[in-house]
Image (cartoon, helix red, strand yellow):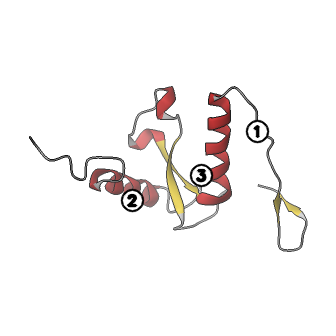
């Protein structure tokens, strides 16, 4: 039986694809424009809705708040509920725009 080592989402093929997406997007969050190496490779159309794991359907998003908010919205939508978008608070204590 052939080994499945490195074949899953955390395997080498996924890491290579993730790195290629980060380079293509210049490590720039496609939602807010922030440049960061602390980001995530995200499916524009979720795999649960038929999205494919290919370059055209992947984007670079900063982990917080963009990727976490998008994931929360998608999970809520799948459960039939709505999510209230919370404001991001700046260092001065005032809400900041996204």
Q: Position of residue 77 (x, y in %)?
A: 66, 30
Q: Pointer 1: residues within 10 angstroms few (<14), some, or many (20+)?
A: few
Q: Residue at x 26, y 47 (%)?
A: 7
Q: Secondary structure at mark 3?
A: loop
Task: Name which quarter of the figure residue 64 lies in.
Answer: bottom right
The picture places residue 98, in percent across and down from the top left corner, at 76, 55
Residue sitting nearer the eye, 77 or 29: 77
Q: Which label is found at residue 83?
A: 1
Residue positioned 28% across, 56% down in the render:
12
On screen, residue 41 versus residue 61, left or right, reads left
Residue 43 can be seen in this image: yes
Between discs 1 and 2, the one toward the N terminus = 2
Q: Looking at the image, is mark 1 or mark 3 nearer the viewer?
A: 1
Q: Quadrant of residue 89?
A: bottom right
| Cα separation between marks 1 and 2 | 31 Å
Q: Residue at left 65%, top 29%?
A: 79
> Which residue occupies the extreme left position in the image?
1
60 sits left or right of 72 in the view:
left
* Residue located beneath label 3 in the image: 30
**Mark drawn on residue 19:** 2
* Foreground tag (3 vs 2): 2
Residue found at the very far bottom of the displayed protein: 91
Q: Nearer the viewer, mark 1 or mark 2?
A: 1
Please tell me which residue lies in front, 47 or 26: 47
- The reply to whether residue 31 is visible in this rendering is no
Label 1 vs label 3: CA separation? Answer: 21 Å
Q: Secondary structure at mark 1?
A: loop
């Amino acid at each position: 039986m052939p080994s499945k080592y490195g074949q899953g989402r955390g395997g080498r093929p996924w890491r290579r694809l993730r790195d290629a997406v980060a380079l293509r997007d210049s490590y720039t969050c496609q939602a807010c424009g922030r440049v960061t190496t602390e980001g995530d490779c995200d499916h524009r159309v979720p795999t649960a809705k038929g999205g494919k794991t290919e370059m055209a359907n992947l984007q670079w998003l900063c982990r917080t708040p963009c990727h976490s908010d998008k994931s929360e919205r998608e999970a809520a939508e799948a459960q039939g509920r709505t999510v209230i978008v919370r404001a991001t608070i700046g260092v001065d204590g005032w809400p900041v725009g996204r």
